[in-house]
Amino acid sequence: MAIRQVRTIGDEILTKACKPVKEMTPRTRELIEDMFDTMYEANGVGLAAPQVGILKQIVVIDVEDGEQYVLINPEIVETSGSQTGVEGCLSVPGKCGQVTRPDHVVVRALNEEMEPVEITGDGLLARCICHECDHLKGSLYVDLVEGELMDQDAEAAEDEGI
Ligand code: NI
């Protein structure tokens, strides 16, 4: 188990576009394991590789629906509906804000074995997929916040830290 340092807003690496993964290597497997460890340690529900300083298109997600998702080179191919809710990010500690996202998302990606997968997400999973895919493009949710960025403590009950 290895916890990696989570990069925070202001770090240039969070603004850069990530490169696709071409092949699975022991090093990349270790990165994915560490990303899960780091996410769980921080009580997050999703984490993207640039958040630990690696500019590769890799996302891990666990919204406590019984699945641990690994999305490599993800591409959102379908969105519908709309949900507005409070969102946070491990790279923006102590803050949260209201963001509108699709309520239904279909994403195509490769799994840890580099096999093509298609995942359908609704509600929190849809929100999380969108949030993490934005990280891979160098975007943070703070640019989508409606109104003011809030202190997380004030909204702790509603927060869905991703
Ligand atoms: Ni985030």
Image (cartoon, rainbow, N blue to C red):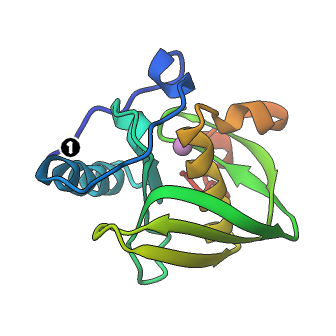
Residue occupying image coordinates x 55% and y 77%: 118
Residue at screen point 53% across, 41% down: 136
Q: From this viewpoint, is residue 146 visible?
A: yes
Q: In the displayed structure, does residue 122 sit left or right of residue 116?
A: right
Within 10 Å of disc 1 (Cα), the crowding (few <14, some 14-19, many 20+) is some
- Kind of residue sitting beneath label 1: Ile
Location of residue 24 with respect to 96 vertically, above or below: below
Q: Position of residue 107 (x, y in %)?
A: 61, 68
Choose top left, top right, bottom left or bottom right for residue 105: bottom right
- In the rendered image, residue 61, in percent from the top left (x then y), is placed at 45, 63
Q: Quadrant of ligand 1?
A: top right
Q: Is residue 15 above or below residue 134?
A: above
Residue at the image point whose x is 54% and y is 51% from the top: 162
For label 1, the residue is: 3
Q: How many marks?
A: 1
- Residue 50 % position (x, y): 42, 35
Secondary structure under the numbered disc 1 in the rendered image: loop
- Residue 157 visible to an observer of this rendering: no
Nearer to me, 144 or 118: 118
